Image: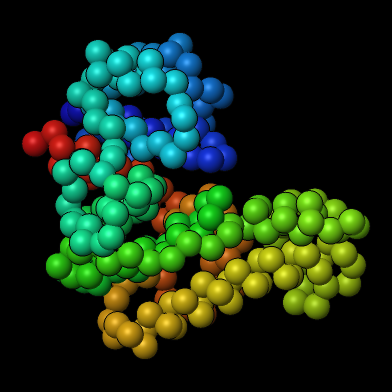
């Protein structure tokens, strides 16, 4: 059974999802994008295939390394995808968005899908049942909102997300938690409701490292999977290795 390394280089973290066949094994957070780090993963898991999704300027040498040791694919606008992108300037679509759309199509191939990624930014991505990515929207993510309030005011502190805060904050910290996390939850529900007015029946998929803070506060039914981007990368890797 083959092993696939699915690298996701985002604005905040460098990560890799490891698959044995179609089964997701685990996530590994890379300390850096050096050749030594990547080679150690290849050797540890005896990888046969690899795919890289990157929204940063990573070391170009690792692409040569992955191509030398595995069947390698770099995700980009020229990749073969299990969906089409009939939108303006498809070359500008983020690799992370393509990956979660591919996962949505792989998991719910017969339906319309709204895939929501919670990362540095929130991305809303709509794919119809003909597997056409129609676009969506982008808004600031959780940590970006916390940081913006701290950096653009004189007195508000920079805080980290926590669960268990009240609706009515009783100090500065709980006011910020309530405003950002509940505000984002209402935004997500509101966007889902707006799509429901335009498109009647569709699946809602939610993913991202911040997902756990919002799921308890959402009223809409969702399919939550923290590993959705890896599953999409795996599907794209398979699609390009046929």
Q: Is residue 23 visible?
A: no
| Residue 18 position (above or below residue 193) | above
> Residue 122 in the image: x percent, y percent?
51, 59
Is 198 positioned to the left or the right of 110 in the image?
right
Q: Is residue 181 visible?
A: yes
> Residue 226 in the image: x percent, y percent?
45, 52
How many numbered discs sit on the rendered protein?
0
Which residue is at 20% across, 24% downward? 71
Which residue is at 24% across, 26% downward? 72
| Residue 86 position (above or below residue 151) | below
**In this figure, which colouring scheme has been used for the structure?**
rainbow
Residue 3: name its quadrant. top left
Which residue is at 13% across, 33% downward? 241
> Residue 167 in the image: x percent, y percent?
75, 77
| Residue 22 position (above or below residue 49) | below
On-image quarter of the N terminus: top left
Kindly give the residue lying farthest to the front in the view shown: 89
On-image quarter of the C terminus: top left
> Residue 123 in the image: x percent, y percent?
45, 60
Nearest the viewer among 129 and 145 is 145
Nearest the viewer among 129 and 43 is 129
Which residue is at 21% across, 41% downward? 78
Kindly give the residue lying farthest to the bottom in the view shown: 197
């Amino acid at each position: 059974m083959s092993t696939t390394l699915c690298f996701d280089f985002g604005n905040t973290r460098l990560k890799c999802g490891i698959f044995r066949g179609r089964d997701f094994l685990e996530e590994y957070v890379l300390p850096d994008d050096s050749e030594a780090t990547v080679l150690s993963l290849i050797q540890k898991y005896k990888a046969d295939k690899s795919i890289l999704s990157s929204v940063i300027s990573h070391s170009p040498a690792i692409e040569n390394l992955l191509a030398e040791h595995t069947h390698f694919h770099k995700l980009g606008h020229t990749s073969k995808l299990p969906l089409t992108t009939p939108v303006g300037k498809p070359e500008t679509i983020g690799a992370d968005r393509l990956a979660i759309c591919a996962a949505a199509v792989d998991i719910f191939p017969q339906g319309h899908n709204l895939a929501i990624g919670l990362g540095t930014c929130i991305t809303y991505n709509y794919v119809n049942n003909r597997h056409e990515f129609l676009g969506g929207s982008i808004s600031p993510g959780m940590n970006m909102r916390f940081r913006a309030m701290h950096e653009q005011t004189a007195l508000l502190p920079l805080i980290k997300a926590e669960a268990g805060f009240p609706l009515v904050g009783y100090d500065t910290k709980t006011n910020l938690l309530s405003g950002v996390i509940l505000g984002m939850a209402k935004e997500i529900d509101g966007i889902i409701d707006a799509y429901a007015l335009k498109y009647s029946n569709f699946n809602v998929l939610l993913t991202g490292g911040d997902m756990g803070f919002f799921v308890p506060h959402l009223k809409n039914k969702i399919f939550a999977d923290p590993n959705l981007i890896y599953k999409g990368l795996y599907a794209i890797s398979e699609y390009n290795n046929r």
